[in-house]
Amino acid sequence: MLRQKNSINHYFVLVVILIATVLYLQYSSENTTAEDFKCLKCHKGKDSLEKYVYEKNIKTAEELRALIRKGPKAGLHVTSTDADIERAIIYLNLK
Ligand code: HEC
């Protein structure tokens, strides 16, 4: 009786570890791809996104979306997808 209970506990622990591993791998792969979204192909070094956000005084996610889509440089960003902009918002920690 007691033995059976213990073996159930062992399976339970294994399942929990398995789920935790899967979740961790998913999380870490999201983190690595966040570093190489398309914006960074053009925006690196002295043209970094951080620099533009600082210079243009961009404080919110909405300001960034508007500047990319409707600002004077919108023409340079026609190839940028909405997903890229959302990645940039996360990367820049805008709210
Ligand atoms: C094809 C290359 C390219 C890509 C991809 C690109 N940009 Fe740009 N971006 C530029 C260039 C070129 C400028 C103008 C630089 C200047 O003003 O000298 C610019 C300007 C900007 C500016 C300043 C806008 C302004 O009105 O002055 C911001 C902010 C910006 N980019 C954000 C982004 C974000 C966010 C992404 C990804 C969604 C992105 N860019 C993708 C080339 C690119």
Image (tube, helix red, strand yellow):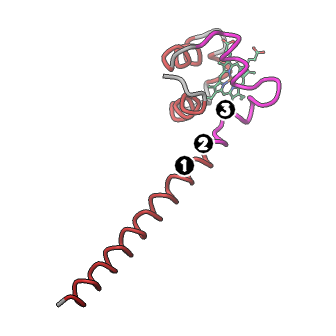
Image location (x, y in percent) of residue 36: 67, 43
- Whichever of labels 3 and 1 marks the residue nearer the N terminus, that label is 1
Judge left or right: residue 3 versus residue 51.
Answer: left
Secondary structure at badge 2 equals: helix
Image location (x, y in percent) of residue 84: 57, 34
> What residue is pinned by disc 2?
34
Could you say which is closer to the camera, residue 1 or residue 93?
A: 1
Could you say which is closer to the camera, residue 41 or residue 1?
A: 1
Q: Nearer the viewer, mark 2 or mark 3?
A: 2
> What residue is pinned by disc 3?
39
Q: Where are the magenta residues, as a range?
A: 34-58
**Is 75 included in the stretch rendered in magenta?**
no
Image location (x, y in percent) of residue 22: 45, 63
Q: Nearer the viewer, mark 3 or mark 1?
A: 1
> What residue is pinned by disc 1?
30
- Whichever of labels 2 and 3 marks the residue nearer the N terminus, that label is 2
What amino acid does circle 3 point to?
Cys
What amino acid does circle 1 point to?
Glu
Q: Is residue 58 above or below residue 37?
A: above
Tell me what residue is drawn at x 31 percent, y 74 percent: 12
Q: Is residue 10 above or below residue 39?
A: below
Tell me what residue is drawn at x 42 percent, y 70 percent: 18
